[in-house]
Amino acid sequence: MTPAAIRQLVLRLANENSRRGHRRIHGELARLGHTVAASTVWNILHAASIDPAPRRNGLTWREFLAAQANSIIACDFLHIDTISLQRLYALLFLEHRTRRLHIAGVTTHPTGEWVTQQARNLANKLGTRMESLRFLTRDRDTKYTRTFDAVFKADNIEILKTPPQAPKQTPTANESLAPCAAKFSTTS
């Protein structure tokens, strides 16, 4: 086949089944007897502005967060080193919809019991606003015990844990709270 005919065939296969990625389309071409590299298929799709298969249908991550922002709260620890070289740990909760930051508490030695009590205090503080929340995102720190999760599960909030060793999956620590951390450390 000519390159133009292969290009048309690649685009046709991509449009007929949006779940096929460039490797699957490459395999289909090979089954049909066409010798073309997988990277060539990818280049054809990229030139035609066709996204990789999982991104063609459905929401982007940004669209998902915008759609679910009303129902997500995230929590994480922030550590602060004082001028006397003492390390303080602050438990923070961030409501995605309002970007409201709740400093649940500050301690030198956070324990599972302390973290659970801070969760109870937050639930009491939020009151009826807890009903609008559906998801709590958190990392896999051992201080988040079953009783901590139970505080939120009692209000039908699903706990979403970030993948292990994936610090960028927790936006509270890396992105959202960085400006707050600087302000908080100057006040303590």
Image (tube, rainbow, N blue to C red):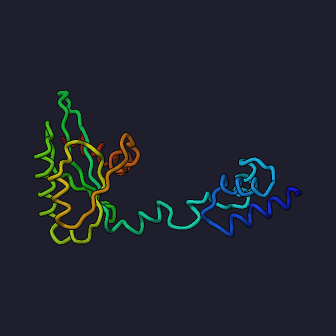
Of residue 154 and residue 74, the one placed in the foreground of this image is 154
Q: Position of residue 146 (x, y in %)?
A: 17, 51
Report the side of 44 relative to 71 (left or right).
Answer: right
**Looking at the picture, does residue 54 appear above or below residue 128?**
above
Q: Position of residue 124 (x, y in %)?
A: 12, 63
Residue at the outermost top position: 85
Of residue 91 and residue 140, the one placed in the foreground of this image is 140
Report the side of 35 relative to 59 (left or right).
Answer: right
Of residue 126 and residue 58, the one placed in the foreground of this image is 58
Quarter holding the N terminus is bottom right
Residue at the outermost right position: 2
| Res. 187 image quadrant | top left
* Residue occupying image coordinates x 26% and y 52%: 75
* Residue occupying image coordinates x 66% and y 52%: 23
Q: Position of residue 138 (x, y in %)?
A: 29, 51
Q: How many badges with numbers are in the image?
A: 0
* Residue occupying image coordinates x 69% and y 57%: 25
* Residue occupying image coordinates x 13% and y 41%: 111
Quarter holding the C terminus is top left
Report the side of 53 relative to 118 (left or right).
Answer: right
Q: Position of residue 76 (x, y in %)?
A: 27, 48
| Res. 122 image quadrant | bottom left
Report the side of 77 relative to 66 (left or right).
Answer: left
